[in-house]
Image (tube, coloured by chain):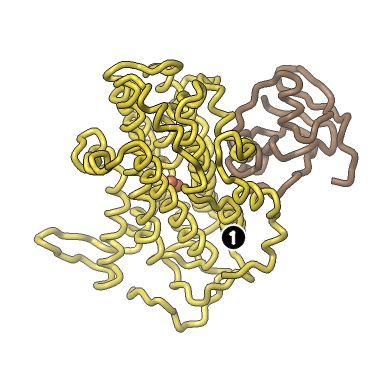
Chain colours: A yellow, B brown
Amino acid sequence: MKYTTFNQQPTDFMVEPMFFGNPVNVARYDQQKHAIFEKLIEKQISFFWRPEEVDVSKDRMDFQSLSEAEKHIFISNLKYQTLLDSVQGRSPNIALLPIVSLPELETWIETWSFFETIHSRSYTHILRNLFTDPSHVFDDIIANDEIKRRAADISKYYDALIFATQLWQTQGEGTHVVDGETHVINMRELKKKLYLCMNSVNALEAIRFYVSFACTFAFAERKLMEGNSKIIRLIARDENLHLTSTQHILNLWAKGKDDPEMAEIAAECEEEAREIFLNAVQQEKEWAHYLFANGSMIGLNEDILCQYVEYIANQRMAAIGLGQPFDVSSNPLPWMNNYLNSDNVQVAPQESEISSYLVGQIDSEVSADDFDEFEL
Amino acid sequence: MTTPTKGRMIRLSDGSAFSSSKDTILEDLEENNVTLEYHCREGFCGACRCKLISGEVDYTIDPLAFIDDDEILPCCTIPLTDIMLDI
Ligand code: FES
Ligand SMILES: [Fe+2]
Ligand SMILES: [Fe+2]
């Protein structure tokens, strides 16, 4: 079915599925099939922040005092996060907007992606402060094998969905040969690709950031790189919200509350979904190994970080009905929660110079009701 | 939120029990040295999710996190009756 930017057919959004129904026409939020997405938009907008609001200038001196092993940990994590947000800043838009069928979900996807671009811009803000010319850090992201391997796994489900959607929207269902390769395009296949892609995004936001977050907050526990930590806390708060959105999508499908065919696919592909998650867990553990290859940092080592990944994975897998495959019952890094707590994000401005004046004010003053009349 | 909700019994599956006195069930658990996972403490991340075995709770804010029908978010709920949690 050809994509149209304004579907001229009258559409009742209350009976459309989230994806692969009729294309959206009027961006209206007066009727919502799944009101949760409108609430997520409101919450996300209330979190608005700008990297420039956070003063990272003290970090430059801290960075000079780090050991070589610690510098490797710090910079490698920023590279990996830069990769993750590069992908997330464009992919939900490109992969999901052409097939979305609900206005509130369409706007959620755009809002979500927009915040990923704030994350991306914040890495430049952090690195510009540390290096007069940070280009070697960015250049290494597409040269570094450890990062490239992860990039391939992260982007492949998106790419498969995007390509299949393009074939379907230009040539329709059927068997198509492109560059000598045969592709079978039908709705079931498209929906399967969507399902796997959503699981991969869910796993990405559920666990892929957490090794890096743990290192950042371990530095902050030692009062080091606190400007950076402030930014990462704002990012972590956004990521928790993004994760909630894909958990809702996956659960709406699995529980038959949206497209009944997606419920069948969810049951059929459960093993594959689990594999996607477990593979991400494995890669994060390998990442911890790579980080500490030149030496550990105070307060963290490879072992404890791997346990933390398993602990977080248990929680996040349980949330989407994949059980708790790992044997870790208590949080091996309990201090992490103090940094993931959204109350603590708005500390007094003098504490680390966040002009979170703006951030704090918005957050405390906006209640869900304030957005009752909200329209874009 | 108009019902007085302090002084309700919060029972846990290990048999321990205490009465509510704080602004959220999570704070009551912490007050009584029960460790429960949390991240946001604002109802949008789901980290604190747990099963409500019996009783009724009320939400202090509109929760955004995904929860199953038999689950609650202790970071943004108060007990309306005596409750039992699967912790
Ligand atoms: S701590 Fe985030 S929902 Fe309760
Ligand atoms: Fe992000
Ligand atoms: Fe994200």
Question: Looking at the image, which residue is at 33% across and 26% down?
Answer: A71
Asked if residue A265 is positioned above or below residue B14 in the image, the reply reads below
Q: Position of residue A218 (x, y in %)?
A: 47, 24
Question: Looking at the image, which residue is at 31% across and 49% down?
Answer: A157
Q: Position of residue A302 (x, y in %)?
A: 37, 19
Q: Is residue A288 visible?
A: yes
Please rate how many residues cluster around mark 1, counting C-alpha atoms within 10 Å: few if below 14, some from 14 to 19, many from 20.
Answer: many
Asked if residue A273 is positioned above or below residue A38 in the image, the reply reads above
A51 on left or right of A95: right
Q: Amino acid at mark 1?
A: Glu
Q: Is residue A267 visible?
A: no
Closer to the camera in the image, A137 or A233: A137
A210 on left or right of B58: left
Q: Position of residue A367 (x, y in %)?
A: 70, 54
Question: Looking at the image, which residue is at 62% across and 42% down?
Answer: B68
Question: Looking at the image, which residue is at 59% across and 64% down?
Answer: A33
Asked if residue A338 is positioned above or below residue A201 in the image, the reply reads above
Considering every residue shown, the one lying at the far bottom of the view is A8
Residue linked to disc 1 = A38
Closer to the camera in the image, A14 or A282: A282
A40 on left or right of B81: left
Quadrant where the N terminus of chain A sits is bottom left
| Element marked by disc 1 | helix
